[in-house]
Image (cartoon, grey):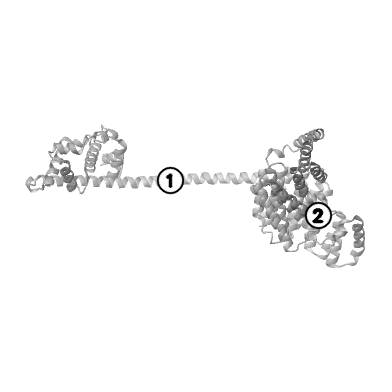
């Protein structure tokens, strides 16, 4: 994978020689010689195009230096930026890493200051991939973080998406597939619509490519199907706007991922037909790496059809393609061992398994630090900033908690004072009501008994009985018991109570008597606990006692007693 997609981006961004000129070495050499003779006689854009064709054909640093020098002379910032970026790509394949780091620093500084962000982020991505390939994982991680921060500062969502794509690809190559999926899906989310510009179109395709690869590793057929379809839509749009693809990489790759999804859904014949169609887009002379996903899908399709000979041919192509690039080479090696085992070639299969284990152990020792899962997600920036942010967050939380506690405490004090003031008023009303009821009783007592109705007479007899004997303190008191004591029936007694108590029934009347008695005990008898007061007042349930007392007086019995002591 490495910088292949970036190469394809520049195939699109810059004019290229014809397929015939690039596919035949002799023709390419002849073209370069002709252009070298012609270039000095050309002016302006024509000279730039000629020099750029020479540089892309030879991929020599000296030829890119000529492109850069000509662009400076012409004061053409865009052409100069293109030359600088391509020169870095050339250096990433040829120069020592320390020289590359020096040159990248200069290139990035120029590209950012000149606001050529498309080339700036492409250069950054090439540099990070090169660092990671050289197993400088910490440096690659830091560079990815810096790239993301630069994109965020410059408000460049495409740059942010590219940085997260690089992050996801590093997670992928460290076998951290769930983390890779998270980073790549975030990259997909922030990436602008691919219809906005060519660079976004290429980046969108690259993100989808890595998402499909990760979904395959996670064996997530749903996500594989989703992102394969989105990759296919990208290619369809490319065709609509008649954007050339000399290599055929994009349609072949789109077909390969869709075929992989079909294979995992049991649609083998459809997958085979799709891969056969993909062959029509493949061009002679283009490196097999451009079609690596096709060979992976073809290998899988042939393997599922038990065509192990064909599957071995496909996997051998991949092994040659990934030679020296361990994350993919090891996967191919393991796959070949599995195919050989199914083909009945146990000795060869065992030999490859042994080779795989030996190489895997070697790589494990080299990459032990990276495999400890210490890489950060790109959108967390770096550890120091995260710790600073967390420290500040904890400070804010602590300060907020203290403030909230003070507010709650102050509110509690205010609430308590208001509640106490309200309860004092309620207690005062209780006392006033008690006095009023005493006056009413005193007035009734001086009335001639014959002047009262029969129901009033019966109610007076009942009240006197309750006052003298306190029958309501019996929790099992029944209406029939009182009727018998008063030599009447239950109906007459119930009517007498209802008429002279504003419609209360027998139960409410008895409860009211018990509450009044309990209130007096709370005020006058400190030797009794609150619970004992309830029992002596005739309540057979503490919960009922506390509930009805609060409903009647607006406060608990305990609070009622405390208010009474104040008075």
As drawn, the residue found furthest toward the top would be 527
Q: Nearer the viewer, mark 1 or mark 2?
A: 2
**SS category of the residue bearing label 1:** helix
Distance (Cα) linking label 1 and label 2: 72 Å
Q: Position of residue 311 (x, y in %)?
A: 79, 43
**Residue at image location 60% in from the left, 46% down from the top:** 389
Q: Residue at label 1? A: 408
Q: Nearer the viewer, residue 108 or 211?
A: 211
The quarter holding residue 559 reads: top left
The quarter holding residue 53 reads: bottom right
Q: Position of residue 549 (x, y in %)?
A: 28, 41
Q: Is residue 115 visible?
A: no
Tag 2 or tag 1, which sits nearer the N-term?
Answer: 2
Q: Residue at label 2? A: 282
**Residue at image location 90% in from the left, 55% down from the top:** 25
Check the picture and name the quadrant holding the C terminus: top left
Q: Position of residue 419 (x, y in %)?
A: 33, 46
Q: Position of residue 346 (x, y in %)?
A: 80, 33
Judge left or right: residue 511 versus residue 402: left
The residue carrying pointer 2 sits among few (fewer than 14), some (14 to 19) or many (20 or more) residues within 10 Å by Cα, namely some
Q: Is residue 515 visible?
A: yes
Q: How many marks?
A: 2
Judge left or right: residue 318 versus residue 481: right
**SS category of the residue bearing label 2:** loop
Judge left or right: residue 160 versus residue 84: left
Q: Can you say whether 191 is above or below 402 in the image?
A: below
């Amino acid at each position: 994978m490495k910088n292949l997609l970036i190469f394809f981006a520049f195939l699109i961004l810059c004019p290229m020689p014809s397929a015939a000129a690039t596919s035949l070495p002799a023709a390419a050499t002849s073209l370069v010689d002709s252009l070298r003779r012609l270039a000095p006689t050309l002016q302006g854009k024509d000279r730039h195009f000629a020099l750029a064709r020479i540089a892309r054909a030879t991929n020599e640093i000296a030829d890119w230096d000529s492109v850069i020098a000509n662009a400076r002379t012409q004061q053409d910032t865009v052409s100069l930026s293109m030359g600088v970026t391509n020169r870095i790509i050339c250096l990433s394949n040829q120069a020592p890493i320390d020289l590359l780091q020096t040159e990248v620093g200069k290139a990035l500084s120029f590209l950012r200051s000149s606001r050529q962000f498309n080339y700036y982020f492409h250069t950054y991505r090439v540099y990070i991939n090169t660092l990671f390939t050289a197993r400088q994982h910490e440096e690659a991680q830091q560079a990815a973080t810096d790239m993301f921060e630069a994109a965020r500062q410059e408000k460049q969502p495409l740059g942010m998406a590219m940085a997260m794509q690089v992050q996801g690809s590093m997670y992928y190559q460290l076998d951290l597939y769930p983390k890779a999926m998270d980073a790549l899906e975030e990259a997909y989310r922030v990436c602008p619509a691919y219809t906005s510009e060519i660079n976004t179109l290429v980046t969108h395709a690259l993100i989808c490519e890595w998402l499909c690869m990760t979904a395959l590793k996670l064996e997530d057929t749903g996500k594989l199907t989703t992102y394969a379809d989105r990759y296919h839509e990208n290619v369809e749009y490319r065709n609509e706007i008649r954007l050339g693809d000399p290599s055929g990489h994009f349609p072949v790759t789109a077909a390969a991922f869709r075929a992989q999804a079909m294979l995992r859904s049991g649609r083998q014949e459809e997958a085979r037909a799709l891969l056969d169609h993909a062959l029509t887009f493949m061009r002679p002379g283009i490196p097999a790496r451009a079609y690596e996903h096709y060979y992976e899908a073809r290998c899988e399709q042939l393997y599922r059809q038990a065509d192990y000979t064909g599957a071995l041919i496909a996997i051998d192509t991949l092994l040659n393609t990934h030679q020296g690039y361990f994350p993919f080479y090891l996967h191919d090696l393991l796959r070949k061992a599995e195919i050989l085992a199914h083909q009945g070639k146990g000795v060869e299969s065992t030999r490859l398994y042994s080779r795989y284990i030996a190489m895997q152990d070697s790589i494990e020792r080299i990459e032990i630090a990276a495999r400890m899962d210490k890489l950060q997600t790109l959108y967390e920036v770096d550890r120091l900033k995260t710790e600073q942010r967390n420290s500040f967050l904890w400070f804010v939380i602590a300060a907020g908690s203290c403030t909230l506690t003070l507010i709650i405490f102050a509110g509690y004090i205010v609430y308590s004072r208001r509640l106490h003031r309200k309860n004092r008023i309620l207690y005062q009303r209780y006392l006033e009501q008690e006095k009023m009821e005493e006056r009413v009783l005193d007035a009734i007592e001086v009335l001639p008994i014959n002047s009262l109705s029969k129901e009033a007479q019966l109610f007076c007899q009942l009240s006197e009985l309750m006052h003298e004997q306190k029958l309501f303190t019996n929790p099992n008191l029944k209406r029939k018991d009182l009727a018998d004591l008063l030599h009447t029936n239950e109906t007459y007694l119930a009517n007498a109570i209802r008429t002279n108590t504003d419609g209360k029934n027998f139960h409410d009347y008895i409860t009211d008597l018990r509450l009044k008695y309990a209130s007096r005990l709370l005020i006058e008898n400190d030797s009794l606990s609150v619970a004992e007061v309830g029992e002596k007042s005739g309540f057979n349930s503490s919960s009922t006692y506390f509930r009805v007392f609060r409903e009647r007086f607006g406060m608990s019995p305990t609070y009622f007693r405390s208010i009474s002591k104040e008075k």
